[in-house]
Amino acid sequence: QKGGLLGFASVALACGSAPSEFSHFLPKFLPPVLNFFQDGTPSRLKYYACEALYNIAKTGHVLILPHSIFNAIFNGLCKLYADTENEVRNAVAEVDRVMKDIVTQCGDKFETEQFVPLLHDNMPFRNPSVRQLMLSWISILLKVPQVQMVSY
């Protein structure tokens, strides 16, 4: 499993020189990586899944913004922010950072109307780390001129 995740990460990096080709691989890469974000997965595998997702997001850049992809990633972030292992939380924070960078750089392609219900659904989480994640996303989106958060 660890080898598979490292393989996904490596292939994502290798596709960095041909982003148009990566669009064909993204739907095949993402579900297996996100499956490792589930409860009961060993922490070490969650860490490597974060590493793979980081490379996928970095390579895919704007390709991860369609709501079906972005929302799946964001749900995964919410799960891992509530994780008990510091190593996993640190790794997911790096993925979160790259996701925020992509949204701020490509705000005109971000589907706000699809994301706001997801924010709403995750607000009742009792975990303070997940709540902080929600607030940080709201704060970032309010600063992106192309994203119309005020209407929501």
Image (cartoon, grey):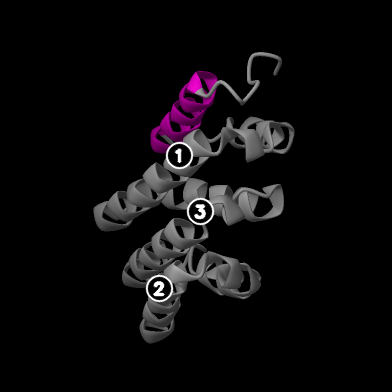
- What amino acid is found at the position of numbered circle 3 in the picture? His
Magenta region, residue range: 128-143
> From the viewer's perspective, is the residue at label 2 or at label 3 nearer?
3
Element marked by disc 3: helix
Q: Which residue is mark 3?
A: 61
Q: Closest to the observer: 97 or 105?
A: 105
- Give the residue drawn at x 35%, y 69%: 48
Q: Earlier in the sequence, mark 2 or mark 3?
A: 2
Q: Which residue is mark 2?
A: 9
User: Spatial distance from mark 3 to mark 1, Cα to Cα?
Assistant: 11 Å
Q: Decide if residue 125 is on the left or right side of residue 43.
A: right
Specify whether residue 133 is painted magenta: yes
Q: Main secondary structure of the magenta part?
A: helix
Q: Closest to the observer: 123 or 48?
A: 48
User: Spatial distance from mark 2 to mark 3, Cα to Cα?
Assistant: 14 Å
Element marked by disc 1: helix
User: Spatial distance from mark 1 to mark 2, Cα to Cα?
Assistant: 20 Å
Q: Which residue is mark 1?
A: 100
> Compared to 64, does 110 lie above or below?
above
Most distant residue in the left direction: 87
> Compared to 94, does 105 lie above or below?
above
Quarter-wise, where is residue 21 in the image? bottom right
> From the viewer's perspective, is the residue at label 3 or at label 1 nearer?
3
Specify whether residue 52 is painted magenta: no
- What amino acid is found at the position of numbered circle 2 in the picture? Ala
